[in-house]
Amino acid sequence: MEILRCYGKTSITNLHIPQPNEASVSSAEPFTKTGKPNFLLPSLTLKINFMQKNYILLAGILAIYSCSNDKSGSNNINKALQDSIQTYLNDYNKKYQQLNTIANETSWLTQTHIVEGDSSNSVANNKAQEALAEFTGSSFNIEKATQYLKQQDNLSQLQGKQLKSILYEAANNPGTLQEVVKARIKAETKQTEDLFGFDFKIDGKSVSTNDIDEILASEKNMAKRQKAWEASKEVGKGLKTGLMNLRDLRNKTVQGLGYKDYFEYQVSEYGMTTQEMIDMLQKFNKELYPLFRELHTYARYELAKKFNVKEVPDLIPAHWLPNRWGQDWSSLIEVKGINLDSALKTKDAEWIVKQGERFYVSLGFPELPKTFWEKSDLYPLPKDAKYKKNNHASAWHMDYDKDVRSLMSVIPNSEWYETSHHELGHIYYYLSYSNPDVPILLREGANRAYHEALGTMMGMAAMQKPFMENLNLIPKGNKSDEMQKLLKEALNYVVFIPFSTGTMSMFEHDFYANNLPSDQLNKRWWELAAQYQGIAPPTTRGEDYCDAATKTHINDDPAQYYDYALSSILLFQLHDHIATTILHQDPHATNYYDNKEVGKFISGIMTPGASKDWREMLKEKTGSDLSAKAMLDYFSPLMDYLKKENENRKYTLPELK
């Protein structure tokens, strides 16, 4: 399932070879004539015998191949083997696309139409997810992919990548653990409903997450801020039991095919071990730590001044910050001469999204499909709506082709302006690699971080001063404090690094790899927040709370948050290349708009999808391996400024040794 906000070992047991009397799926249609998902697909279809003929052919080919020394005969056999492999992959891709489309449709409904007490959407989604899981995790597909991968000399690069992808998908849904997989799917659906169906309240009055975010961004009354922050954490209480259950089910699922735990499984998609990933995250965190330490000291004193607190705390109280998880502090700074929120007050929510489309079209990308506007859910629900929806922005690739959608709650402000550009980055990535040269199985980013990097980079580009001047969102030639602008960006991008590399990634590592006990979840969450982010809760948070679970990704995008950390590093590397090599502009003040060369560069990354190695892609496009150098260079002018501002102030985060 391709939903974004972004190959390993196998152990084969109890393999099942389909028998001739098992039902075929080749003629089953994914939807009824009314357009609704078809859940009447025969249960026996998931025995996968539509590929039976290939298995028999392969057995014959391998038998002949093992006995043949004739060169011309060997070439003929290789051709026959190649054809057999390709036929299998074609059949797999077709069925994979078909079942994913149904699963995406039902999942879409569970997140866009949540009605308390109505389980029809969740029941349908469970059926669709089980059908997909039974197919991808079937013993037949595990055996076929494993057998073909042994024929490395006869595989093309694309075939090898697809076969590894099949085994990776199988590890998440192994047919040898069907009951565990079904239980996990059911638990995940319920967790999603509990998370996004939650009724947030302040003083007994229902509020939206947009309402809470607005209070944290602008309210100066400390009591009101604390109420809003605490209200945002109430959802975690009811999610804790489900999360513990999901941890066990997720670990058991992937352990069936040889992974130690779910964290290791997710990391393996990068072609890395858990330790290699942890080392990389710690390296990036360490490189940016000196700048973050300056930002932390600066923010402590500036926030104390803002809230008229005489004694500056060593750790920043979480409810002082404008973001519910302390991952973005940028709204602490208002840059004179750049007041985007003021300009956007004259626009409506639709203009925000349409302007994002105009940006991509100006680079040479096509207009969005008509179905995007018809089927997406882009704006907040009416106050009197009888149902709820997920308010967290996401992009959806429904059919691995041209049915692309976004789920947002856009209102005309700078945050949603940037977010819309980001989400459309995912959408255009989907559309770019949905081409005949990229098999369905490889219609993903070069790695998961690429998706986030390109989306975030486009959001950042849309916020740069020359870009906004070009759109008349701010007056042309208007003077602004460039250091304050850079500070505002650092309070977004640099502050995010310790949250993503540290608090989130280390918590999920401990949760899955170390089986963190249920009576230590909140304790560990706030230990990590103190260590990496230098923040603390306003009051003691016992184990009746589960503050980690209030973060969407902990529940429905698990063990992958390092994607966002790596994407932040990657986006500055790509942006630096665009600014210096294509635009010949200062990376701090670029204007991508209407530049077809920029569009060509971005399209060149997007179009191959996952058909190319992500490391080779980066080296080819930028000339270097993944590195924090571009990000460090971008923010280097801030160090002297912050050291001067922090002179005679107490630093409470330790210096690096």
Image (tube, rainbow, N blue to C red):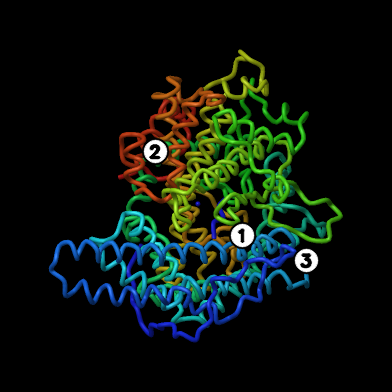
Sequence-earlier tag: 3 or 2: 3
Q: Quadrant of the N terminus?
A: bottom right
Residue 115, label in figure: 3
Asked which quadrant contains residue 276, the reply is bottom left
Horizontal side, residue 258 vs residue 75: left or right: right
Horizontal side, residue 7 vs residue 360: left or right: left
Q: Residue at x 17, y 61 (%)?
A: 72
Sequence-earlier tag: 1 or 3: 3
Q: Quadrant of the C terminus?
A: top left
Sequence-earlier tag: 1 or 2: 2
Mark 1: which amino acid?
Thr
Real-space Cα separation, disc 1 to disc 2, in angstroms: 29 Å
Mark 2: which amino acid?
Pro
Q: Which residue is mark 2?
A: 290
Q: Which residue is mark 1?
A: 550
Real-space Cα separation, disc 1 to disc 3, in angstroms: 20 Å
Q: Is residue 278 visible?
A: no
Residue situated furthest left in the rendering: 69
- The image shows residue 624 at horizontal and vertical percentages of 31, 37
Q: Residue at x 44, y 50 (%)?
A: 438
Residue situated furthest right in the rendering: 384
Q: Is residue 145 visible?
A: yes
Within 10 Å of the Cα at label 1, are there few (<14), some (14-19), or many (20+) other Cα atoms?
A: many
Q: Secondary structure at mark 3?
A: loop
- The image shows residue 232 at horizontal and vertical percentages of 68, 56
Q: How many marks on residues?
A: 3
Q: Answer above or below: position of 200 versus 183.
A: above
Question: In the image, which is nearer the foreground, mark 1 or mark 2?
Answer: 1
Horizontal side, residue 371 vs residue 622: left or right: right
